[in-house]
Image (cartoon, grey):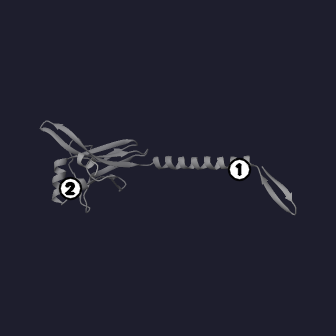
């Protein structure tokens, strides 16, 4: 509470420390609320993350090592994946117009907290990379969304044991 007091010829305000503490607490609570609203608003849209890993699939003809590109929608809104592939240095992309049968069909609708995976034989990927003068360790997975955006994997490489070893 402010109290106006006369000090000689001048007037001055005297402020209670409890009022200051209450005002500071209100500012902190307002800032926290605003931050939380920003986070939930960001998560209410489409939040697609792309990862690339290795898988071993058992086919009737034998086991195959596969490279998997997975798109995960961590947001609440839905989106559609219309294409996928691996981008090589220099802008060349490896795309599979006829992916392996275990891949999700395209277009693939990703609802909130849903994922889709697409597969390519790692041997075929290595051959394609060699034809373009690079290795699979330089490839970066990507998906194309229905809104025209392309989402890249956060890391280069295809998730092999060689890539996971610490530099030494």
Distance (Cα) linking label 2 and label 1: 63 Å
Query: Which of the two residues, 58 or 115, is positioned nearer the viewer here?
Result: 58
* Residue 49: % across, % down: 36, 48
**According to the image, label 1 marks what residue?**
20
* In the image: residue 17, left or right of residue 151: right
Which residue is found at the position 61% from the left and 48% from the top?
Answer: 28
**According to the image, label 2 marks what residue?**
135
Q: Residues within 10 Å of mark 2 (few under 14, many from 20)?
A: some
Q: Residues within 10 Å of mark 1 (few under 14, many from 20)?
A: few
Residue at the farthest front position: 168
Which residue is found at the position 76% from the left and 49% from the top?
Answer: 16
Which residue is found at the position 53% from the left and 46% from the top?
Answer: 36
Residue at the farthest left position: 61
Question: Which element carries disc 2, helix, strand or loop?
Answer: loop
Question: Which element carries disc 1, helix, strand or loop?
Answer: helix
Which image quadrant is residue 161 in?
A: top left
* In the image: residue 122, left or right of residue 27: left
Picture mark count? 2
Query: Which of the two residues, 115 or 53, is positioned nearer the viewer here?
Result: 53
Q: Which of the labelled discs sits on residue 108, or is there none?
A: none
């Amino acid at each position: 509470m402010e109290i106006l007091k006369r000090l000689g010829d001048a007037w001055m305000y005297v402020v209670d420390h409890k009022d200051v503490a209450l005002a500071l607490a209100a500012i902190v609570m307002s800032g926290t609320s605003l931050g939380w609203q920003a986070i939930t608003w960001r998560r209410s849209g489409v939040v697609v993350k792309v990862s690339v890993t290795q898988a071993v699939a058992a086919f009737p003809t034998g086991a195959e090592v596969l490279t998997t590109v997975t798109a995960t929608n961590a947001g609440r809104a839905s989106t559609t994946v219309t294409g996928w592939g691996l981008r090589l240095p220099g802008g060349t992309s490896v795309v599979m117009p006829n992916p392996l049968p275990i891949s999700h069909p395209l277009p693939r609708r990703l609802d909130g907290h849903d994922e889709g995976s697409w597969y390519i034989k790692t041997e075929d990927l290595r051959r394609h990379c060699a034809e373009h003068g690079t290795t699979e360790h330089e490839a970066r997975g990507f998906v194309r969304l229905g809104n025209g955006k392309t989402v890249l994997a956060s890391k280069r490489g295809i998730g092999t044991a060689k890539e996971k070893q610490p530099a030494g």
